[in-house]
Image (spheres, grey):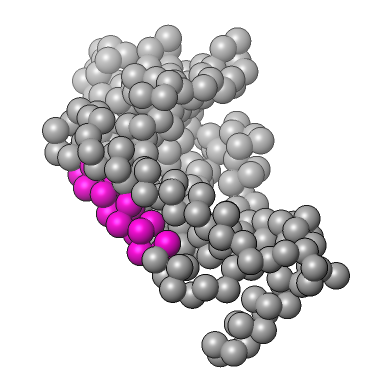
Amino acid sequence: MGKALQRIWNNLAGYTRAQRSIIKSVLYFFILLFVLFPNPALVIDQIGAYLNTEALFETGFPEMATINAQIDSLLPADFTFQEEYEAIVRFVYDNIHYEFDWDNWANSEYWPPASKVWRRGREDCDGRAILAVAIFRSRGYRDADIVGSMQHLWIQVNGKELMGPDKEKLVVVQDGKKQFRMPSWHYMLETLAVQLNYFPKFRIVILLLALLTLLYHPAQKLKRLLALLITAMLGFTLLVDWAHEVEFYKQLTFSAGLMIGSLLILASLAVAILSKNSPEKNSK
């Protein structure tokens, strides 16, 4: 196995730098796809969800009548919108247990249609929001829709944002159309901390080590590569510690863990890029 990998490594070194860049970019794309989205069928569904979110808000699936009957049983005779909202949200939270997409579906992101959320019985904030929108629409609130940030998905209905609105919006609805906004750097760092806390760390490690190895090619010094991999892992460990600190104190901090961890990873990547033996004399 080791000799086979060595042959592949050396054969790839024979191509021009431009050819190697294309081959390695394609290879890393497939590694990224496999690590983040190991279920390709759901990737296709997710692309469809981004292109047509309206299709997610199913109001006519068979169980909807039973769902609304159960919600009605929770309401007084002359209920207000606030009481109806609270009953719907409580119903969704009670019946759809929280589970991250990567645990539930294997893929790092997946927006299922409302019927699939209900039948699955477990989802994260996006599935809960999708089902809630479908329920609201089935009850006559045609303006109900989703609103999203980098960390969370919630709903907008009757002019109000419900189900825990986040402080920065990435997806907003204006005049019936969804628009995307760029988040602030501060919020992006908060999102990084959240991902480092909850996203499967072995997946991040695979992506980081694969990137470093591909950038290091076609250099031949194994000890240097191992040193770079260890340095990057040390930087990643410091970043994870920083993320735990942010989660514990519920406040973004610019601590040594963030600074040193980021520098170690960036330095490893930079050295990997510059560690080339490879003069183009062997190129095809």
Image-quadrant location for residue 71: top left
Image location of residue 192, percent across then percent down = 36, 39
All told, the count of numbered labels is 0
Quadrant containing the C terminus is bottom right
Q: Which residues are magenta?
A: 228-244
Residue 159 lies, with reference to residue 148, above or below; the image says: above
Nearest the viewer among 220 and 214 is 220
Nearest the viewer among 97 and 223 is 223
Q: Does residue 250 appear left or right of residue 43 in this picture?
A: left
Give me the residue at 37% from left, 17% from top: 161
Give me the residue at 65% from left, 76% from top: 9
Q: Main secondary structure of the magenta part?
A: helix
Q: Is residue 237 magenta?
A: yes
Image location of residue 153, percent across then percent down = 41, 31
Does residue 151 appear in the picture of this structure?
yes
Give me the residue at 35% from left, 64% from top: 230
Residue 14 lies, with reference to residue 71, above or below; the image says: below
Does residue 101 appear in the picture of this structure?
no
Q: Does residue 54 appear left or right of residue 169 in this picture?
A: right
Q: Is residue 197 magenta?
A: no
